[in-house]
Image (cartoon, rainbow, N blue to C red):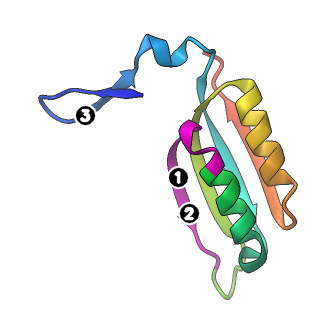
Amino acid sequence: MCETNAGNGAALAPSADARADGARIGFVGLLVENRAAAAPAVNKALSEAAPIIRARLGIPGRADSPVSVITLVVEATTDQLGRLAGTLGRIPGVSVRSALSKI
């Protein structure tokens, strides 16, 4: 729901209509301890939450550090963020932390 400045292609802030529902910018951080087992459930939850996800960064684990990290930037209401965090947090081997901006 971002508008784009046709002159330079830069994304502008979401329109007022996009925030009328109380959505705010926030983040979700995931630590995935067993990537092979958790990946299908994590990807399913993230696919279902695609409308509120603005950005996603994933860092795979290594042999010396088998924990993978996923960071999401979201634009969501408190209920939407809580639903996503709860769904992800119930997946075995996944730890979740999240926050929304105050404004």
> Alpha carbon of mark 2 to alpha carbon of mark 3: how far?
24 Å
Sequence-wise, which precedes: disc 2 or disc 3?
3
**Residue located beneath label 1 in the image:** 56
Screen quadrant of the N terminus: top left
Q: Read off the magenta span.
A: 48-61
Q: Position of residue 19 (x, y in %)?
A: 53, 16
Question: How crowded is the residue under tag 2: few (<14 C-alpha within 10 Å), some, or many (20+)?
Answer: few
Neighbourhood count class around disc 1 (C-alpha, 10 Å): few under 14, some 14–19, many 20 upward: some
Say which quarter of the image contains residue 94. Answer: bottom right
Q: Name the residue under label 3.
A: 10
| Helix, strand or loop status at disc 1 | strand
Residue type marked 2 = Gly
Q: Disc 2 marks which residue?
A: 58
Up the image or down, 40 lies above or below 19; here it is below
Quadrant of the drawing holding the C terminus: top right
Q: Return the x and y of residue 101 as percentages of the image width and height.
A: 63, 24
Circle 3 crowding by C-alpha within 10 Å: few under 14, some 14–19, many from 20: few
